[in-house]
Image: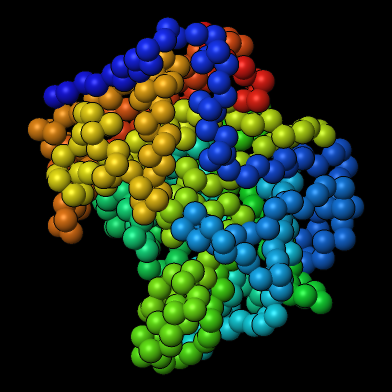
Amino acid sequence: FLVWQCPVMKLGLPFTAAVAADHGWKFLHAYPKQYVARALGKGQSIEIDGDLSDAAWGEVPFTSTPFEDIAQPLFPNYVLPKQYASRVKVRWDADFLYVAAELGEPFVTGVVTGHNPTLSSPNPIGNVPYYDNDFEVFVDVSGTNYYYKEFEMNYLNATYDVLWRAADTGLGSTGVPCCDDNSCARWCQNSTYPLFKGTWSMFPRMRTATGRTKTGWVAEIAFPLRGDAAAGGLLDGGADWEQFDPNKGARYWMMDFSRAEHPFFTSNSSNFGVLCPLVQKTQPTLLGQDQWSCYWEWAWQSVGGHRYMHNPNTWGYVQMASGKETVCRDVQWPTRHLLSQIYQLQIAKVQAEGSYTADLLSSVKSYCTIANGCNATTVMEAATTYSKLFNLQLTVDNNDTSCVLYGVKGSGSAPTGGPCFRASVSMVLDSGDRVQGVIDESRYLNVTSSGSGCLDDQVSWL
């Protein structure tokens, strides 16, 4: 059982106000994209019909930055071709979150139809919307990485939605081991899609529509905020998830928007192993070489070095505004970012060696890399230059067997049976705002703060 607390770095000079005023501790180099979503005004409404000419849409801007490759840090020079330009708007009211997307697409097509239990396709390769070229929305209302929602739709208005209890595994990205059949407390997902054998969906209260444009197509969606006996909602999750309702003052949701784009369509699965490697020779951003992964994923906010959307802590911010607010960057960001990097480092180490580290600096070079979406500079600076600010504490118990078990060198994973770690941060900023955060091997990220200031307003710390 080990407890580690970052020492103050010995710089040869005393800790001074000049160091305190250094804004590097904000990790703005890694701050994600942020969109201000305005609430509908009194008497305003949005008709979900695939036509974005509603006055309520006209008075708010689209996202201002282009979509990028899902793993843009791996491909810094990649630029999404202009004919695939994508942009999004978001609004909300007492009952719904509204999303509108314009998607550049030279090849508007689709064969999948239906919703979750009724999804069907004449193509035997697959029957969910992402087997066509689709549009996707990911929502984590709590910022904890837990109970997030995934939604997909194609041009034919086929839809698919899932409530994920914890981050999923895929395309080289490590998820949280859990029970696929919902038989234990650490279950994976809930959805009426037959593969998951669950009961959750926002349909039929969720409303969706598509429309054709000169350059592609439009997706328009109204997601219910709260679930009822007929359907689920975005606020479904933990016992106290109502606190994340923007109508009750919640300011930030972690969200991302993406689209799956295929290099070709075929009904013969053997074609993928032949054609996909050929495409990858000149288009290395193509995710994989089989029928499940041979596509590009383009996102509003890239997910670090990961190549899988199921990394909620990497998504962008949607700032819920009741009026014409400007961007207010989240004061919790430095804590959220640091703890997320520590999680990635620890999981990489336990998968390689079967144990967590109590000394981050000794492991950062080996286990915190772009390959696992981990920023080594963040960890090193927090453990040295900014240790007085973050007051980082790390508890490790490699003899415990009650925590999540991550497979070592490819061995089996399980909801329990593994060692434990816990990292915590406690910050006091010059505004008086206090920020505290905790993460452990289950990837549950719990960050709280007092005050309502913006990160940009913070000059130093106490």
Compare residues 41 and 442 and report the one nearer the observer.
Answer: 442
Dividing the picture into quarters, in which one does residue 246 lie? top right
List x then y, in percent, for residue 132: 56, 78
What's the residue at 53%, 81% (across, down)? 263
Residue situated furthest left in the rendering: 399
Compare residues 46 and 230 and report the one nearer the observer.
Answer: 46
What's the residue at 20%, 44% (across, down)? 350
List x then y, in percent, for residue 197: 37, 63
List x then y, in percent, for residue 179: 27, 53
State the count of labels.
Answer: 0
- Apparent side of residue 131 relative to residue 414 in the rendered image (left or right): right
Dividing the picture into quarters, in which one does residue 9 lie? top left
Compare residues 210 and 312 and report the one nearer the observer.
Answer: 312
Relative to 437, say whether 169 is above or below. below
Compare residues 306 and 221 and report the one nearer the observer.
Answer: 306
Inspect this view and state whether residue 151 appears.
no
Relative to 310, say whether 294 is above or below. below
Relative to 114, say whether 47 is above or below. above
List x then y, in percent, for residue 248: 65, 28
Inspect this view and state whether residue 50 appears.
yes
What is the quadrant of the N terminus in the image?
A: top left
What's the residue at 50%, 75% (across, down)? 283
Relative to 46, say whether 435 is above or below. above
